[in-house]
Amino acid sequence: MQTEEFDKIWNLYQTLFPAASSRLKNANTRKAWQVALEPYAMDDVVDASMCWARKTKFFPDIADITGNLIPEQLAEDAEDPALDREDRRMCPKWMIPYVQRTFGRIAEGCREQLHAAGLETWREASERGVPWLEWLAACRAVFGEDILPLEPDSRVCGEA
């Protein structure tokens, strides 16, 4: 967020929360908010601020505004046409390797079940260069929305 954009946000706060004028005039408070809001897009901050103002008349804490926001850099990195905005919030880009590793372990435990369905495990697919989302889509096509069970079913997958 640019300084000019932050100035607009701060003016919005002065309008929305007139009872907090002493906090809004404090230079340290302003600087703390400016640093905290820097990684976020102005439009996202405005939306979150308006949601907060609709719920309460009290001046928010920084976490009340930034709690559900995605930093601009992470949002740009996570731009993937196969993922909509809601999916990116539920699984940010930094989390994907952990998700892949978890699903990879589950898939290894269900190797026979996957092979019987004509699918590869994540490890096999990744070694062939298959993208994560392509493998995931193939699993979803066979297993439905619950891609793979959270725990391998010992009756189907053998002892895990």
Image (tube, rainbow, N blue to C red):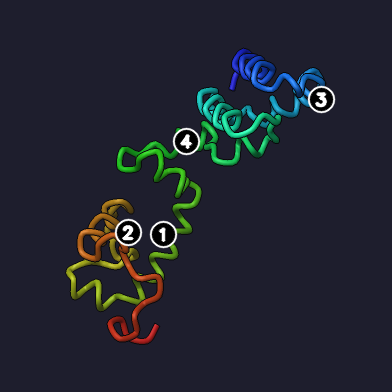
User: Which badge, 2 or 4, is on the more N-terminal residue?
Assistant: 4
Distance, label 4 to label 1, CA atoms, is 19 Å
Occupied quadrant, residue 118: bottom left
* Percent coordinates x, y for residue 47 in the rendering: 52, 27
91 in relation to 158, above or below: above
Residue neighbourhood size for the residue with mark 4, other residues' Cα within 10 Å, grouped as few (<14), some (14–19), many (≥20): some
Label 3 sits on residue: 28
106 in relation to 84, above or below: below
Occupied quadrant, residue 58: top right
Residue at the image point whose x is 30% and y is 67% from the top: 121
Q: Which mark is residue 75?
A: 4
The quadrant of the picture occupied by the N terminus is top right
Q: Which mark is residue 100?
A: 1
**Nearer to me, 114 or 144:** 144
User: Which badge, 1 or 2, is on the more N-terminal residue?
Assistant: 1
Distance, label 4 to label 3, CA atoms, is 29 Å
User: Which badge, 4 or 3, is on the more N-terminal residue?
Assistant: 3
Residue at the image point whose x is 59% and y is 30% from the top: 39
